[in-house]
Amino acid sequence: MAGLILFLLMAISVVAADEDAFIGVNIGNDVSDMPTPTQVVALLKAQNIKHVRLFDADRAMLLALANTGIQVIVSIPNEQLLGIGQSNATAANWVSRNVIAHVPATNITAIAVGSDVLTTLPNAGPILVSALKFIHSALVASNLDRLIKVSTPHASSIILDSFPPSQAFFNRTWDPVMVPLLKFLQSSGSYLMLNVYPYYDYMKSNGVIPLDYALFRPLPPNKEAVDSNTLLHYTNVFDAVVDAAYFAMSYLNITNVPVVVTESGWPSKGDSTEPDATVDNANTYNNMYLNTGTPKRPGIAVSTFIYELYNEDLRPGSTSEKNWGLFDADGIPIYILHLTGAGTVLANDTTNQTFCVAKEGSDRKMLQAALDWACGPGKVDCSPMLQGQSCYQPDNVVAHATYAFNAYFQRMAKSPGTCDFKGVATITTTDPSHGSCIFPGSTGKNGTFVNGTSLAPSSNSTTSGCHSQYLDSGSSFTSSVIIGILFLTLVVSL
């Protein structure tokens, strides 16, 4: 009983998916030299990764994850779906073997029933909801239904006409499945699992979707996509797809089921037909997950599982299919990733100490404009520069611009071109921190690495960015950035 109480306490943060957004990773095993479960868990712990999704319910892996506190989504493979969807007893046996046998030692928080069923295994569609209900009934019988959620991951392609998001709707062919499925998610307090791949949307768009829009790279206001119905501005594919899912649910009168993105990422290597599958692009994309919400739901960050932990060299298909991982099989990072949220992920790049600062002699008006952009559309958290905060002094545009430029530079993982700001910024190896003002990327006074994205608003932030705070701060950079509403026509199927 004590163990079950501990499990309950560990699971409280999962019950409300909106409240504590996190970044997790998927763990696939199509690897020729797959690390042992003990090695996998050692890597997760070393990187402080606290949320994982398995594509099965491998016993050895679940045993290795025991007593780590790592929150785990286990999965029912598609090939087992038919038996479970047709038999309550089969579902109960699956839960007994793969869940009850491991909790509370292993912190299982959700069961993913199948994956992309409606788009890859449509013949199983009619029994999908039954499978979810049978699995849930087995959890109810064991008093685990409040701790472990049941859902099924969907490809984002089940959403039709996804731009503008306000006009999006689920493929009506699947209404007989989606309507009862969403009602089940609503009644059971679960969430919609969605797989979002802007890389594929970009590749299939034949140039209609700009690369920067797919990669989360900042866009000038005149390049943002605007939903003409809501006047909401979209700066990336990810946000647009997530909001399209919310709008699609609302048209079916479902308004309180949160979205959790169960797969998203960008490949680091491709063949000759995939020139944008590069390390730089994968680094840029995966560094930008910790947002402050979508235009429709500002201030509510989206929990997301990165696809994936390891490169899977045994996966069939193009070169890119084998190169979505953060690590190779030896545990060597494919690139350095700086993420915060549910712990720090891959923030081990403490040797490359470079900073972005305001260039000496720069025009003050240009500095001011760049500062306004960084603290507004650039989504840098500039609150440390508010009056009374650690980086308020010296109160001048050069000092404040230096802080904002560097915060953006570190947030973008020091990607090429992110320390320019129309020529008023430059890179330096001299740490610009001073007094109690510790800059992002600095080791700080106590030698503790300040992560490049640590200044991003937390998942329970109530604002998207901090520019509105500057309107009331009275400091030297309170000029507002007036962004005219641009009615772009970007009618693509994301």
Image (tube, helix red, strand yellow):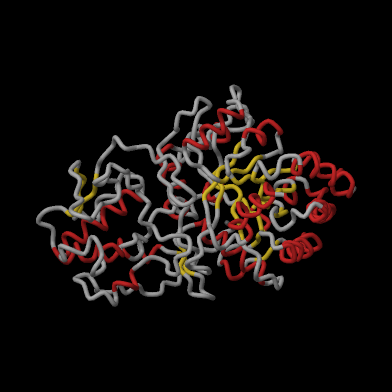
Q: Residue at x 45, y 55 (%)?
A: 213
Q: Quadrant of residue 482?
A: bottom left
User: How many numbered marks are there?
Assistant: 0
- Residue 357 percent location from the top left of the image: 20, 51
Q: Is residue 308 visible?
A: yes
Q: Residue at x 48, y 64 (%)?
A: 460
- Residue 91 percent location from the top left of the image: 84, 46
Between residues 81 and 50, which one lies in front from this camera angle?
50
- Residue 247 lies, with reference to residue 266, above or below; the image says below
Viewed as shown, does residue 193 lie left or right of 173? left
Viewed as shown, does residue 206 lie left or right of 71? left
Q: Is residue 131 visible?
A: no
Between residues 299 and 204, which one lies in front from this camera angle?
299
- Residue 96 lies, with reference to residue 247, above or below; the image says above
* Residue most extreme to the front: 2
Q: Residue at x 42, y 36 (%)?
A: 335
- Residue 486 lies, with reference to residue 49, above or below; the image says below
- Residue 125 percent location from the top left of the image: 80, 52
Between residues 17 and 317, which one lies in front from this camera angle?
17
* Residue most extreme to the left: 361
Viewed as shown, does residue 404 lie left or right of 200? left
- Residue 187 percent location from the top left of the image: 75, 66
Report the quarter where the C terminus lies. Answer: bottom right
